[in-house]
Amino acid sequence: MESILVTGGAGYIGSHTCLDFLEKGYCLIVIDSNINSSTQSLKQIIKIGNLVGQDFKERIFFVRGDIRNEKLLNDIFIKAEKTNKKVYSVIHFAGLKSISDSVQDPLSYWDNNLIGAINLLKTMKKHDCKNIVFSSSASVYQNAKISITEKMEKSPSNPYGQTKLTIENLLIDIFESDSNWRIANLRYFNPIGAHESGLIGEDLLNEPTNIFPIICQVANGFRQKIDIFGNDWPTKDGTCIRDYIHVMDLAKAHVASLDYLMKGSPKLINLNIGTGKGISVLSLIKEFEIINKCKIDYKFVNRRVGDLPQVVANNSLSLSLLNWKPVKDISDMCADGWKWAKNNPNGYKKINSSTENISIKNLL
Ligand SMILES: NC(=O)c1ccc[n+]([C@@H]2O[C@H](COP(=O)([O-])OP(=O)(O)OC[C@H]3O[C@@H](n4cnc5c(N)ncnc54)[C@H](O)[C@@H]3O)[C@@H](O)[C@H]2O)c1
């Protein structure tokens, strides 16, 4: 059976996406350095499979390592082919993702994200694997807008977004040099929530800077209040508006994108992956309080440099091209995300015992 190489597959979005691919019968090889994750996420996926009577462990293989290691990537492609798991496509999540860290330490971001992508693409080309779904980001867009379309001006305001746009540009160059490639750049808006089982979710190995995990920390009593950056933005309640998308809807967009890429002739597509609905910070907090029956204290502080009042996707291209649409609403996101965070306040650290009999097969 041919396989898909999932870089960064042990991370937040990667693990949810692996689960969806496994449920649909695919074979996966995950490479992850675990710089921001643990393999416990993959064990939990196997556990979810067991709970619904599906055996995933014969279809998921792991390699701990860094995609900047060209020899290691090459070994993966060779071993996969030798063991009848030839890699025909890549889903590329691996990368560093904090905007604020990228401002503090741009070199690490350029090194990890860009060198990693270059190594990966070189190795793919060498092994004639020309199908890739890339995790890009709404941060490639320049301006605050409602209904951002894929064609709008790109000019990221931080090194993280610059690395994403540079990789997109590299992929365009590759496609122009060889039109046999099939490439999807998925520009995610704001993924939140967790799988409905509460068994996988976002594992916070560093202090979160995104709003949803901070709301969960307040709900868990780890913080007293959430700081809301500005109540004087030009929005209906003065707080910033974002396009939140349930991580499982986002996961399904990867399966749908790969299906779309593999149909018909080779192509390069750029797609916004959001719901197209804007939610203000205050509305998100209110939804969380109502659905989870708890109180989230907050205080208003000054606007954060670089923030934008409204960032909302126009997702009509994704809806029309992919056999996909987001089905989960903001209350699902708040309920599922809190189920994970409430049951696992320390992320994956303390749940090893329930999966101690589960092992992940190493590919190499
Ligand atoms: N979470 C978001 O809000 C968001 C929004 C837009 C885009 N993205 C992008 O989506 C992708 C996945 O994001 P996430 O939220 O799951 O992040 P994550 O940190 O949970 O997952 C990334 C994974 O990649 C691994 N990794 C990092 N560098 C690596 C390397 N050089 N070699 C091998 N593994 C490496 C990490 O250990 C981690 O498991 C990232 O590329 C991120 O930039 C995320």
Image: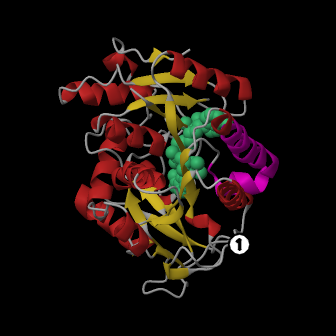
Whether residue 363 is situated above or below residue 104 in the rendered picture: above
Tell me the kind of residue under disc 1.
Ser
Whether residue 41 is visible to the viewer of this picture, yes or no, is no
Seen as rendered, the residue at the extreme top is: 357
Dot 1: element: loop
Residue under the point 29% across and 49% down = 336
Whether residue 55 is situated above or below residue 158 in the rendered picture: above
Left or right position of 62 against 52: right
Part of the protein shown in magenta: 97-122
- Front position in the image: 3 or 157: 3
The quarter holding residue 205 reads top right
Residue under the point 36% across and 13% down = 356
The quarter holding residue 364 reads top right
Q: Is residue 303 magenta?
A: no
- Quadrant of the picture in which ligand 1 is shown: top right
Q: Is residue 117 magenta?
A: yes
Left or right position of 234 against 290: right
Left or right position of 127 against 14: right
Residue under the point 48% across and 16% down = 83
Q: Which residue is mark 1?
A: 155
Residue under the point 46% across and 73% down = 313
Position in image of residue 77 (x %, y %): 59, 26
Left or right position of 163 against 279: right
Position in image of residue 146 (x %, y %): 48, 82
